[in-house]
Amino acid sequence: MPSARDSSHPWHESGRSSQGQPADRDELMAPSTQIVGDHEDYLGQGQRDVGRRISDDQVELFVVSDAAHALQQQFTLHRPEFLVLHDVGISASLRLLAGLAMAAGARVQSLSVRRQGHGVALASLQFVEVTLADKSVVRVYSTDINSDNQTRTQLSKVLLGFSRLGVLMIGAMPPHALTAHLTPLHEALSRGPWHNRDLLMVPVGSSTALAAQAQQLCHGSQVAVHVTPQAGKPRQAWNYIGGAWNRLHGKPGGERALPTEIEQAVSKPRVPVTEAATLPMPLDLLTRTFPSPSPSPSPSPSSPPSRPLVPPSSLPSALQPRSVPTAMPTPSVELKLPAMPTPGGTRWSAYVERCAQIKGVIACCVFDMHTVKSLAEAGGPPQGERLAQQGASLLLAMNEAARALGLGPARAEAAISTTNHHLLLRPVPGHPGVALHMVMSASSGNLMLIRMQVERIESPK
C-alpha cells in the first residue's frame, strides 16, 4: 500500500511530461504562480483545509460551479488529509461526530458550500477536527449532508474518493439490501477518479457476510477493504477507526498517530480572552461574615496632640482627664449570596410530557442547539436524536437565510406544513441554546391552536 509520501500515489504525481509541459487540462486550473486574494495566505497563515473559517464552528466555501465539482477542485489543489464516515443503511455518522465533540466539550463544526455572489447554501457538511500526535489537525467528515439528494450523493462520492481513510458504518440489513447499497459505491470505485486506497467497514448492527461483501466491493480496483468486529457503541467504533488510521501511518506512537480513546481525540476549545483571567470564587465566600467598618475620627487643627506636654499628675483635680468608657463591639454583618445554579438541574422530562399531551402531537424533543444532543423526548417515531439533528439543521438554515437576506441575527422560529404533518420549531424561553421540535398530525391537530397551547406551557426553571 503506498504511503502518503510515495511518489507513485496519485496525490503526489507531478502531472507533467518529460518535456515539462502540463500533462492534462486540470493542471492549468492550478498554476505554480497565482494571484493571492486572501491576506492570510499571503502572510503564510493559510491552511491546507478547505474553506475559510468565519467562527469557531463555521467554515464557508464560495463556489461558481456545482458543489461536488468545486469540492473536488479544492481537494486536488490543497490535498488535505481527512477521514470520512459514510452511513450504509443506518444513521450513525452524525452520532459518532457528536460523541467526539461532546467528550471534549466542543461543538460539531459545519462547512457551508455557497453560490458565489448569492450566498445561497448549496450544501452543509458536518465535521470535527481531531488532533494527531504531532499537534496537527485532521478533519472527520460525515456524508449525512444537508442538501438535495443528487448533491448529497455526488458529495459523498467525492469525499470517499479523496479521503485518506473512508469508513462505512454498516447497519443491520439482509445481504441483498446491503448489496444494493454497495453497488453504486463499487461502480464509483471502478470509474474513478478514486485516490483513496483504504476503506474500513464498521458493522454497527449485525456483521453477517461482511467479508464476502468486502471482497466484492474491492474487486477490480486497487482499494483495500477491511472489516472490523461489531461496534455497539461510538466508543468502540472510534477505537477501530483510530487503530486503522494508525496502521496506515506506521506505528501507533508515530508523529501522525491518532488517539484511539474518544475522550482524547478532539482538543478542548480554547478559553475566550475575556474569561481567561477569571478565577472561581471560593465556596466559603457565600456565607462568610464580614465586620462592619468603624469610622475613624478625622483629626482637627484645634485638637491637642496625642502625647501630653504636661504630666496629668501635676494638673489640678478639676483638670484631671476622665476615663472614657470602652466602645461597644461592632456588630457583624452576615453577607449571604444566592446559591449557584446546579448544572444539568433542569427537569426537561416534565416539560416535554406536557407538550406531548397536546392533541395531535406525535413526537416532540427538547435539544441543545450547540451539541445537537436530545435533552428529553416523548412519543415517536421519529426518535429524539433524529429530531435534534434535523431541528438543528433547520435552525442553521434559517439563520443562514436571514444573514444572506441582510436581516441580521434574530430568534428563529419555524412552522412547516407537509401533506400529512406539521413541524413546530421554536427556542425555549429563558433557556438560551435550547429549542423545542414537535411533529404533529395534520388531520388531528390544528397548527395555530397547538402553537398557542405550547406558549402557555411554562418552561422549567
Image: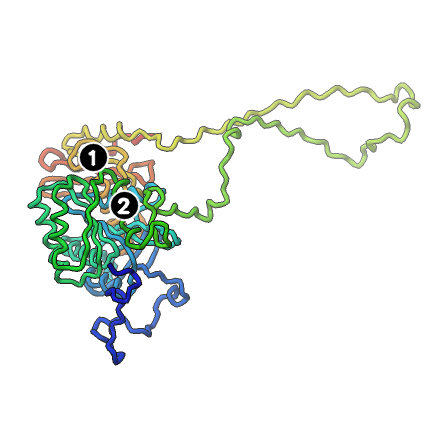
Kindly identify the amino acid type of the residue bearing the numbered disc 1: Cys
Q: Position of residue 52 (x, y in %)?
A: 32, 59
Q: Please rate how many residues cluster around mark 2, counting C-alpha atoms within 10 Å: few if below 14, some from 14 to 19, many from 20.
A: many
- Position of 19 relative to 132 (above/below): below
Q: Residue furthest right?
A: 314
Q: Position of residue 320 (x, y in %)?
A: 87, 21
Closer to the camera in the image, 160 or 28: 160
- What is the distance, in whole Å, between disc 2 and disc 1 at their CAs? 23 Å
Q: Residue at x 41, y 66 (%)?
A: 43
Q: Which mark is residue 364?
A: 1
Q: Residue furthest left?
A: 176
Q: In the picture, residue 231 is in which quadrant?
A: top left
Give the secondary structure at mark 2: helix
Q: Position of residue 417 (x, y in %)?
A: 14, 43
Give the secondary structure at mark 1: strand
Question: Quarter of the image containing the N terminus?
Answer: bottom left
